[in-house]
Amino acid sequence: MKCGRCDNVAAYSRKYSGENLCRNCFSDSILQKTARAISKYNMIKSGDVVGVAVSGGKDSLSLLHVLKKMSESHNFKIKAITIDEGISGYRDEALEIVKNFCDNIGVEYKVFSYKELFDITLEESLELRENEKISSCSICGTLRRRAIDFGGKDLGVDVIATGHNLDDVLQTFVINIISGDTNKIGWMDPDTSSNKTRKIKPFCEIYENEIVFYAFVNEIPFQSEQCPHMNEGIRTEIREFLNSLENKHSGIKNNMYKSIMRISSVVKDSNYKQRKICSKCGSECTGDICSVCSMLVNLKRD
């Protein structure tokens, strides 16, 4: 089977579009899809310094690889922000991968730890939590977002890019729906150009399995070991459910993504005035105290 864009042998079949692509054309298509998302949602402006949140996984390292390529022909610079949650026996491998990768492609990077920023590691926070219904992912995600914000300020970046892909967007939407946190749906709009802190997701329209193949084609090393706490949350079950639907109905994820974007736009417009400033740290939030400050107070109250 030949590539639909050249005469080389096809290496990837994109079922939802019917395309058959060779390794090079597939890699180029990921750059093109990323560039279209950046343009469509006003993600990067001329002269920006983009802070890329790099965990050591396939998504973030692939994003760093893609943006590094783009920065060489466009007027923006990139820096890498890495967060050390303090997961013993797991995070060390990722930190080493990030260090070596950034050194190899010539990208400035810096590591920020939960312990230094919050005086608590993820492992310590899990021992302190009283409500077992609060998953490790909820605690970690809340702290990680704030740590990345701090890293962005420390490195003097204009915008923060994360490796969230289309699958992540769908999973987050379902989680927000079943948890009753509908306000957060309005914060899922990829166009954050009017926000105080600009956060972008250049991979938001790309399937997770395509990013895996991009990393393979471009020989990008990434941590394959899964987080030891990942199965505490419901995200894994939602991922498997959506993947089963896609396997039976190619393109259903794309359709769902388009619907979510329309819903998010409506909710964003209706809830925009509800945004407040945290009385403790000054971050944007929906209440008087942000989720990070509230969580840390609860964890350390004894």
Image (cartoon, rainbow, N blue to C red):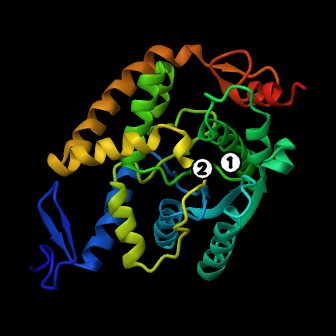
Secondary element under disc 2, as helix, strand or loop, is: strand
Task: Please tell me which residue lies in front, 260 or 32.
Answer: 260
| Mark 2 → mark 1, Cα distance in angstroms | 8 Å
Q: Name the residue that disc number 2 marks.
A: 160
**Residue 148 tag number:** 1
Q: Position of residue 261 (x, y in %)?
A: 34, 33
Name the side, left or right, on which 300 lies relative to 107. Answer: right
Residue farthest along the right direction in this orientation: 302
Task: Please tell me which residue lies in front, 275 or 228.
Answer: 228
Task: Please tell me which residue lies in front, 64 or 125.
Answer: 125
Name the side, left or right, on which 57 lies relative to 263. Answer: right
The residue depicted at 44 percent of the width and 39 percent of the height is 190
User: Residue 250, can we see it?
Assistant: no
Mark positioned earlier in the residue sequence (2 or 1)? 1
Secondary element under disc 1, as helix, strand or loop, is: helix
In the rendered image, the quadrant that contains the N terminus is bottom left
The residue depicted at 66 percent of the width and 70 percent of the height is 93
Decide: few, some or many residues near mark 1? Use Cα within 10 Å; few <14, some 14-19, many ≥20: many
Task: Please tell me which residue lies in front, 8 or 78.
Answer: 8
Q: Is residue 37 above or below residue 8?
A: above
Q: Position of residue 219 (x, y in %)?
A: 45, 80
Q: Amino acid at mark 2?
A: Ile
**Residue 208 tag number:** none
Labels 2 & 1 near each other (Cβ < 8 A): yes
